[in-house]
Image (cartoon, rainbow, N blue to C red):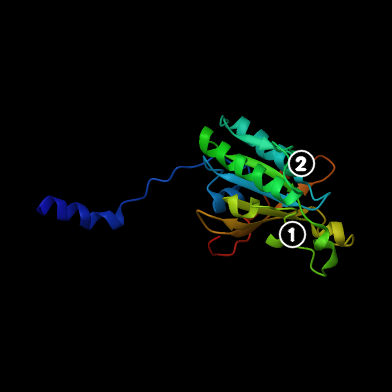
């Protein structure tokens, strides 16, 4: 019994075994998410022209270069056709998001999906996306383990300086902290890269 008590005494000082997921290729984002985790359904959402496809391409290339896959990338949620004849678009997207979540579990891999946001964003003075902006979201907001929003200030404010910043806002993170990471986005080449810092974060759980 004495040896068991000694072992328990040492537990708070023993480093936890953490499983690093598939790298996003962005150090600040990996810091928040610990990479894309197996069995997770990840939604990356934004309005048009925010850089969704370039961001997805960056994630896919980074995963390949680092020897990960399987990992599934889908561009994009609203153009997937559901089985049967759902009553409306909201019900259809709900069915699709449930299927994608099941796919992530069945193959034990990350499933990363792009999604459009509703035009409600454009009606607000602050154009940064909110969870309520997920277009025809059905259950995707509930099914997703991670929801990340993309936002570029220079899209709405052409005089914005600097003009090459992309905000990635982790608005929901079922198994960890939320946070906002700012990266460099070169629109002409579609390249994403870390800024000089690790990005800015806010604490909290999704």
Vertical arrangement, residue 161 with respect to residue 48, above or below: below
Q: Secondary structure at mark 2?
A: helix
At x 76%, y 52%, the residue is 46
Residue 157 image position (x, y, % from top left) = 87, 62
Vertical arrangement, residue 80 with respect to residue 47, above or below: above
Q: Nearer the viewer, residue 77 or 50?
A: 77
- Find out whether the residues at labels 2 and 1 contact each other: C-beta distance under 8 Å: no
Query: Number of numbered discs present?
Result: 2
Can you tell which mark lies on residue 89?
A: none
At x 72%, y 51%, the residue is 90
Residue 172 image position (x, y, % from top left) = 60, 57
Q: Secondary structure at mark 1?
A: helix
Q: Is residue 41 left or right of residue 49?
A: left
Q: Nearer the viewer, residue 78 or 71?
A: 78
Which residue in the protein does label 2 denote?
53
Residue 113 image position (x, y, % from top left) = 67, 42
Q: CA distance from mark 2 to mark 1?
A: 19 Å
Residue 40 image-quadrant placement: top right
* Mark 1 neighbour class, 10 Å CA radius: few under 14, some 14 to 19, many 20 or more: some
Q: Which of the two marks, 2 or 1, is nearer to us in this view?
A: 1
Q: Nearer the viewer, residue 88 or 186?
A: 88
At x 80%, y 51%, the residue is 50
Can you tell which mark lies on residue 133?
A: 1
Quadrant (top left, top right, bottom left, bottom right) of the C terminus: bottom right
Sequence-wise, the earlier of marks 2 and 1 is 2
Residue 64 image-quadrant placement: top right
Single out the residue that lies furthest toward the right.
Answer: 158
Q: Is residue 188 left or right of residue 183?
A: right
Task: Kindly tell me whether residue 116 is visible in this rendering.
Answer: yes
Task: Kindly tell me whether residue 193 is visible in this rendering.
Answer: no
């Amino acid at each position: 019994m004495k040896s068991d008590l000694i072992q328990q005494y040492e537990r708070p000082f023993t480093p936890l075994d953490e499983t690093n997921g598939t790298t996003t290729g962005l150090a600040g984002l990996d810091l928040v998410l610990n990479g894309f985790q197996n069995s997770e359904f990840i939604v990356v959402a934004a309005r048009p022209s925010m850089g969704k496809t370039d961001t997805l391409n960056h994630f896919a290339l980074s995963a390949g270069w680092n020897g990960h896959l399987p990992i599934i990338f889908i561009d994009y949620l609203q153009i997937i056709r559901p089985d049967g004849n759902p009553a409306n678009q909201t019900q259809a997207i709900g069915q699709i998001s449930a299927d994608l979540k099941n796919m992530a579990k069945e193959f034990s891999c990350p499933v990363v999906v792009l999604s459009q946001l509703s035009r409600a964003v454009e009606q607000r003075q602050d154009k940064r996306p909110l969870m309520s902006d997920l277009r025809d979201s059905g259950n995707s907001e509930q099914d997703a383990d991670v929801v990340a929003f993309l936002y570029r200030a220079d899209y709405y404010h052409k005089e914005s300086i600097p003009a090459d910043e992309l905000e990635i806002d982790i608005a929901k993170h079922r198994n960890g902290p939320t946070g906002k990471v700012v990266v460099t986005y070169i629109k002409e080449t579609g390249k994403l890269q870390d800024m000089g810092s690790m990005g800015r974060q806010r604490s909290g759980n999704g």
